[in-house]
Amino acid sequence: MRTENQKAWFFVLPVLILVAFNALVPMMTVVNYSVQETFGDNLFFWQGLDWFEQILRSERFQAALGRQFLFTAIILLIEVPLGIIIALSMPRKGFWVPVCLVLMALPMLIPWNVVGAMWNIFALPKIGMLGYFINDVLGIRYDMTQDPLAAWITVIVMDVWHWTSLVVLLCYAGLVSIPDAYYQAAKIDGASPWSVFRYIQLPKMKTVLTIAILLRFMDSFNIYTEPFVLTGGGPGNSTTLLSIDLVKIALGQFDLGPAAAMSLIYFAITLLVSWVFYVVMTKDDQK
Amino acid sequence: MAEVALSHLKHSYMADPSGPDDYALKEIDVTWRDGGAYALLGPSGCGKSTLLNIISGLLTPSEGRILFDGRDVTELPPDQRNIAQVFQFPVIYDTMTVRQNLAFPLKNRGVDPATIERRVAEIAEMLDVVPMLDTRAANLSPDNKQKISMGRGLVRDDVNVVMFDEPLTVIDPHLKWKLRSKLKELHQRVRATMIYVTHDQTEALTFADEVVVMDLGEVVQIGTPVELFERPQHTFVGHFIGSPGMNILPCEAAGDRARFQVHEIVLEGPVTGQGGTLTLGVRPEHVGLAPGGFPARVAKVSDVGRHYVVDAMVGDARLKAVIDHNPPEPGSEVSLSFRPDKTRVYRDGWIATEARA
């Protein structure tokens, strides 16, 4: 006879409690705020889905969302191919391997607000080395505090500098796991370098690349610290990405209801896009 | 297809080899006939993979030359040698279909589509993979994957030599046999020069017309499976080939007689040479249990199916005999005798008796 008991639940319980307190409970608080109007003295009034409607209709939100998608698309389009190229050109064995790996890991070890501050000082005209070089040596006008395009370029270059390494390291891990026999067979089959990449390296990197793209998507879509420290969302609203806008509404204006509704919409979009990415990138494996 | 000649080949992984021990491959000098099936047999680390890599061009030998049909290819890279290689683990292009996999080497060489289609169809038919031509290669079983990697070698008709580097390692035992006979059949159909590297004697002996037995970077014997079995040139061959391997016993010898402990043994012929350490070699198949020999005590009898393997103690020496029926009881006293024409003396491992004509 098969004995049944419910002991297994006790083993799952710690995780359930942990997840409840660090995700579900805070999230439900946000849900709570999103359907009510808050006044001082903890007065709450039921609003229904009004805040959601207001956010979705607001031009300010739409503009921030647009900027967010543009930013994420640009950094993915730069970081993924660049990461692959760097990973491919890194040595596979010998003295330079640890050197390259450490150099690659360095940017990721720097705290995010420090990255923002570094690039801010680096890029300021007159003061920063980069700002001085472009303005006074190359003679090109470059001021991220005045010019939206310059601000965008700086934010993107900073993100590429900070996070391409993640793609590089993941791709590199995929590359070194390819047995030599594959390269030898390709040589014997007369494959061109492009074919080797297309039919051996890329398929073998696919799993890690999927993870890299997902991580880079989620991180860049939720990015806050670095652009906030670098440009503060300016000049004007030109680099106000979703999370910067969200903080402005929640903590600047103290509109907790709309901010909560916006958080949930923001979260749903991140989740949805990540899911679509994942499904599209893994659909070949199901065949 | 081509004749493959290895001329005074030596290889060391060290930059500056001094003694013979620095060489992973000691001097090798063989010629393999066009269209022949050869096996390189030896234990792990004997240098057979080094030799294979030298032939395929992945490694340049320290000394000596490799000739394909008399043409020196020693300095040529793998893709210019027109060779094919099947690796230990099946190498297939995961994202391609079976058809695309088979067509790949031809496509890379700019062969016209009609010829590609014809060759792929031919090879697929030979390999029995026609029904799976349009499935993705990643979804095949290991034995079919291995067939596809063989197919990629065979699809080209300009191949000088096809090399197999322990190709059955990852194949399930019951499929090994199937794939092995497929390989033999393929060889008979395409008549390519094939070199098969393995540490498995069954694979080597069933596949090859001629087997090269290697040990410690050295060729110890080249011969047909029968020759290797019947007259091992070295105790290593005797021991490595055969199941169980040859009995190797300490002895003294003079003329055509050897003395093993207190027993006098008749040899196949007179002993040659001087000095060194002598051992007596006789295969278990040539040890008989019949009256008139010397006494031994049965330690163990194993029934291995077609015959019995008897472990017998003569003094403190253990030897094995293979007998077909009527196995003795363990612990009983028996009388052992060696077949004189199959009993030899080895000096420092190398054969030291002359066969009688």
Image (cartoon, rainbow, N blue to C red):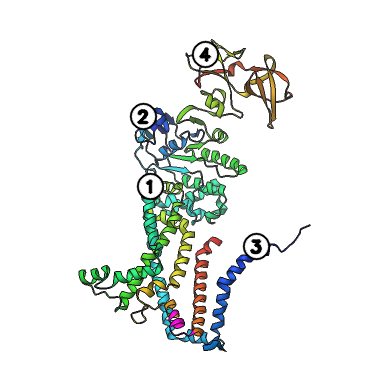
- Splitting the image into 4 quarters, where does residue B160 fall? top left
Task: Tell me which segment is drawn in magenta.
Answer: A247-255
Residue A11, label in figure: 3
Residue identifier under label 1: A94
Residue identifier under label 2: B18
Question: Which of label 3 and label 1 is nearer to you?
Answer: 3
Task: Give B357 or A109, whichever is nearer the viewer.
Answer: A109
**N-terminal of the two: label 3 or label 1?**
3
Left or right: residue A123 versus residue A198 is left
**Residue type at mark 1?**
Gly
Residue A230 pos. (x, y %): 35, 73
The structure residue drawn at horizontal position 35% and vertical position 72%, both measured from the top left corner, is: A155
Q: Is mark 4 on a helix, strand or loop?
A: loop
Mark 3 → mark 2, Cα distance in angstroms: 64 Å
Whether A249 is among the magenta residues is yes
Mark 3 → mark 4, Cα distance in angstroms: 77 Å
Residue identifier under label 4: B271
